[in-house]
Image (tube, rainbow, N blue to C red):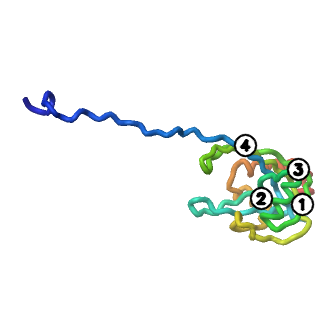
Amino acid sequence: MSGSAGRAGAPKPRRRRRHRRDRRLTTVDETSAGGLVLDPEREHAALIGRLDRHGKLLWSLPKGHIEDGETVEQTAVREVREETGISARVLRPLGTIDYWFVAQQRRVHKTVHHFVLEATGGALSDEDVEVTEVAWVPLTEMETTLAYADERKLVRRAGELFAPDELA
């Protein structure tokens, strides 16, 4: 006989065992607040830059987690101050963004409440450990500077909320 068929003691084909652990991730909801921080002349907005896992600097609106007992407006003001060094006051709601991501073995549904804020004091600072850079960016450059489409859409919406002489 030729070949291995029919030979005694020939190895049997191995079945692949799938060693899949239960890959179901815990799903959690997170809520944050922040927003579009305008300078008093309403010509620039304060943005934060963070490095992604590939080392690319991504610009976004400042935002962060709500702490116990805070309103979303209070969180927006606090996070703006912590992440940019700028003190600000809320002018009006801008909109809410929600998205999903996976981090630390968890599937996260994040909701971020955004506001239009006006700077009232302080100076730009990137001392927050979560922030790589901070900058005042002309409103005319927001479309090309912001990394995330949903935030670009909010900034366009901000232009619709104010009379032309109020925002540009």
The residue labelled by disc 1 is 118
Q: Between 31 and 162, which is closer to the camera in this rendering?
A: 31
Q: Position of residue 85 (x, y in %)?
A: 82, 68
Q: Residue at x 78, y 50 (%)?
A: 32
Q: Position of residue 58 (x, y in %)?
A: 66, 60
- First in sequence: mark 3 vs mark 4: 4
Q: Residues within 10 Å of mark 2 (few under 14, many from 20)?
A: many
Please name the amino acid that badge 1 sits on: Glu
Please name the amino acid that badge 2 sits on: Pro
Is disc 3 in contact with disc 4, using a CB cutoff of under 8 Å?
Answer: no
Q: Between 124 and 74, which is closer to the camera in this rendering?
A: 74
Helix, strand, or loop for circle 3?
loop
Q: Is residue 121 above or below residue 65?
A: below
Helix, strand, or loop for circle 4?
strand
Q: CA distance from mark 3 to mark 1?
A: 18 Å
Q: Of the residues tagged 3 and 1, which is closer to the observer?
A: 3
Q: Which mark is residue 71?
A: 3
Q: Which mark is residue 62?
A: 2
- First in sequence: mark 4 vs mark 2: 4
Please name the amino acid that badge 4 sits on: Asp
Please name the amino acid that badge 3 sits on: Thr
Q: Of the residues tagged 2 and 1, which is closer to the observer?
A: 2
Q: Of the residues tagged 1 and 4, which is closer to the observer?
A: 4
- First in sequence: mark 3 vs mark 1: 3
On the rendered structure, is 103 left or right of 155? Answer: left
Q: Position of residue 154 (x, y in %)?
A: 78, 49
Q: Residues within 10 Å of mark 1 (few under 14, many from 20)?
A: many
On the rendered structure, is 51 left or right of 16? Answer: right
